[in-house]
């Protein structure tokens, strides 16, 4: 990609300038990527599209089979079902971290744990000291 500035009026150098972009460049600073998964934009498309008719990537990450598993295990499981995917372990870790931060907006981790245990009837009552 090549960009340069050009005068709008060639006779007046103090006037207006415009930014001009060449669609093709004779030289590029690196060869074409062999694997598109190194580019976040390619992985984003995989995260956003449905991987099957009724299962999204988000559903897979949040499923009981993914709870407690490392992101690498989740990705390995996911790739067995969908070998064409470009999702990485870092994408899974980022998604889990985002969900955790969203859950902790109004509560501390301990408060959230107590609420979850109470909602599942593991604690019949809670008292704060």
Image (tube, rainbow, N blue to C red):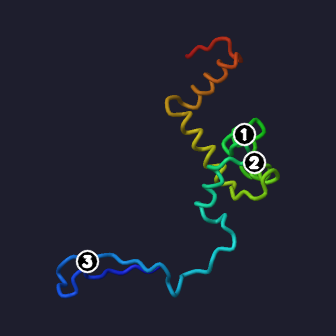
Residue at the image point whose x is 17% and y is 81% from the top: 14
Disc 1 target residue: 54
Q: Residues within 10 Å of mark 1 (few under 14, many from 20)?
A: few
Res 118 label: none
Relative image position of residue 73 (x, y in whole percent) = 77, 49
Q: Residues within 10 Å of mark 2 (few under 14, many from 20)?
A: many
Question: For the residue labelled by badge 1, is the local secondary structure a helix, a strand or a loop?
Answer: loop
Q: Residues within 10 Å of mark 3 (few under 14, many from 20)?
A: some
Toward the right, the furthest residue is 80
Relative image position of residue 22 (x, y in whole percent) = 44, 80
Left or right placement of residue 19 versus residue 71 in this view: left
Residue at the image point whose x is 54% and y is 34% from the top: 104
CA gap between label 1 and label 3 equals: 52 Å
Toward the top, the furthest residue is 125
Question: For the residue labelled by badge 3, is the local secondary structure a helix, a strand or a loop?
Answer: strand
Q: Quadrant of residue 110?
A: top right
Residue at the image point whose x is 56% and y is 16% from the top: 128
Foreground residue, 12 or 81? 12
Disc 2 target residue: 74
Front of the two marks 1 and 2: 1
Res 17 label: 3
């Amino acid at each position: 990609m090549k960009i340069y500035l050009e005068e709008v009026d060639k006779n007046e150098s103090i006037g207006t300038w415009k930014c001009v972009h060449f669609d093709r460049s004779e030289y590029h600073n690196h060869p074409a990527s062999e694997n598109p998964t190194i580019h976040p934009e390619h992985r984003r498309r995989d995260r956003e599209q449905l991987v099957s008719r009724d299962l999204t990537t988000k559903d897979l990450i949040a499923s009981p089979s993914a709870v407690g598993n490392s992101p690498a295990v989740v990705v390995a499981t996911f790739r067995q079902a969908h070998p064409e995917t470009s999702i990485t372990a870092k994408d899974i870790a980022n998604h889990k971290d985002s969900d955790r931060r969203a859950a902790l907006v109004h509560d501390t981790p301990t408060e959230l744990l107590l609420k979850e245990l109470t909602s599942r009837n593991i604690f019949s009552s809670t008292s704060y000291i």
